[in-house]
Amino acid sequence: MSEWTTAGSLWLAVIASGIYHGVNPGMGWPLAVSAGLLDRRASELFRALGLLAMGHFVAMIGILLPFGAMLTLIVWERQIRIAAGLIVIAAGIYLLINRRHPRVLARIPPAQLALWSFAAATAHGAGLMLVPIYLGLCLAGEPDVGHQAAATLMTGNLITATAVSVVHAAAMIVSGGVIAIAVYRWLGPKFISQSWFNLDIVWAASLILVGGIGIASLGFAQ
């Protein structure tokens, strides 16, 4: 598989993860529907979607930026990638055992959608899912990365971290927004109560799988 193909696959994984979050009602699109219905204005629905996207983006970048800085320590690159994989696996196991939504989410006023979205994404480990993918993106197409200057690496990785966060948040809000608009315009509130689906178990299992793949890929990279 070529370096370009590998990089393309990783970017598709970032987008797929965003779409996954978007269609999951736990990430907030029902709140956007509620905002539009309560004020009887579509503009409020789009405003809510914007706030949800903002909170989700901050949660993503908040997770990825530290790893972007850590990757400047190329001497510890392998240990960093292993640690990242183990953290993701641990988060998945925790979410499988503790399936209750964090109480802090219920304490955030509905008007503070950006803060709610940030807290929800952080609590669900949304940013953690991107860490193994992000580490692969930083290395894809850079076979001599270990010999580059630390400052150059830091700049490149932080830019990549921002790009990953933007692409992921955009995919999340577009997919969730499509469902929110459909419910607001045509399906109605009954759709939410009758067709509610929760992807938390699948999400937790996905974290474990991605973390495992991230660690296993180190063996193939040698």
Image (cartoon, helix red, strand yellow):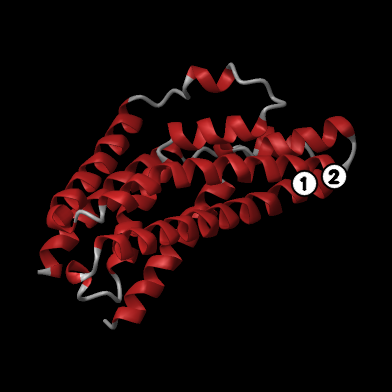
Relative to 117, say whether 22 is above or below: below
Quickly name the residue at label 1.
46
Picture quadrant where residue 124 is located: top left
Q: Quadrant of the C terminus?
A: bottom left
**How far is the residue under mark 1 from the one under mark 2?**
5 Å
Pinpoint residue 178: horizontal percent, then vertical percent: 70, 54
10 Å neighbourhood of mark 2: few (<14), some, or many (≥20)?
Answer: few
Asked where in the image residue 193 lies, by quadrant, the reply is top right
Looking at this view, name the residue that lies furthest to the bottom: 2
Q: Secondary structure at mark 1?
A: helix
Report the residue at 53% width, 60% height from top.
Answer: 167
Q: Position of residue 51 (x, y in %)?
A: 67, 40
- Amino acid type, label 1: Phe
Residue at 36% x, 73% y: name it.
7
The residue carrying mark 2 is: 43
Instruction: Give the residue displayed 64% in from the left and 49% down from the top.
Output: 176
- In front: 168, or 36? 168
Do the numbered discs 1 and 2 sit on residues whose CB atoms are within 8 Å? Answer: yes
Q: What residue is at 77 percent from the left and 46 percent from the top?
A: 46
